Image: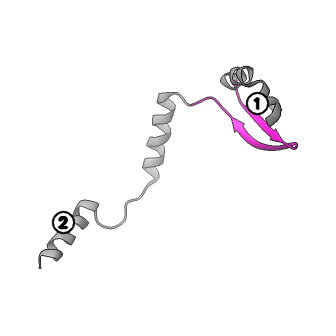
Amino acid sequence: MLRISVEEAAMNLKSLLERVARGEVILLEQDKAVAHLVPPLQKEERLASMRQFRDTLAIKGESLSTTVLNARTEERC
């Protein structure tokens, strides 16, 4: 894994982006890690991670449409 200073990254952005495409790069500022640069996920990977996230959500209470209908009904009374 490449560790590179922010200043060096600014001077060599094009070659740095090529390295990011092949793997992970860590940006350092005053010898401390400040960022991890990784290539973007492929569409299939993004969709899979979104699906996993949605599966962890637990809906509590009534649905939004029911809440809106109840509020409208109460306003009419």
Query: Could you tell me which quadrant the N terminus lies in?
Result: top right
Q: Residue at x 77, y 30 (%)?
A: 9
Q: Residues within 10 Å of mark 1 (few under 14, many from 20)?
A: few
Question: In terms of image quadrants, where is residue 16?
Answer: top right
Say if 49 sits above or below 19 in the image. Answer: below
Marker disc for residue 69: 2
Residue drawn at (43%, 48%) of the image: 54
Is residue 38 one of those drawn in magenta? yes
Report if residue 1 is visible in the image.
Answer: no
User: In x, y percent, where is residue 2?
Assistant: 80, 29
Q: Is residue 77 above or below residue 19?
A: below
Q: Nearer the viewer, mark 1 or mark 2?
A: 1
Q: Residue at x 82, y 30 (%)?
A: 8
How far across and down, in percent of the image, does residue 23 sit? Answer: 70, 26
Q: Amino acid at mark 1?
A: Ala
Q: Which SS class for mark 1?
A: helix
Please name the residue shown 21% across and 71% down the image: 71
Q: Position of residue 74 (x, y in %)?
A: 17, 76
Secondary structure under tag 2 reads: helix
Q: Nearer the viewer, residue 56 or 29?
A: 29
Question: Residue 64 versus residue 35: which sits nearer the camera?
Answer: 35
Q: List the residue tagged with mark 1.
A: 10
**Three-letter amino acid code at the position of disc 2:** Leu
* Residue stretch rendered in magenta on the structure: 23-40
- Here the colouring is one colour
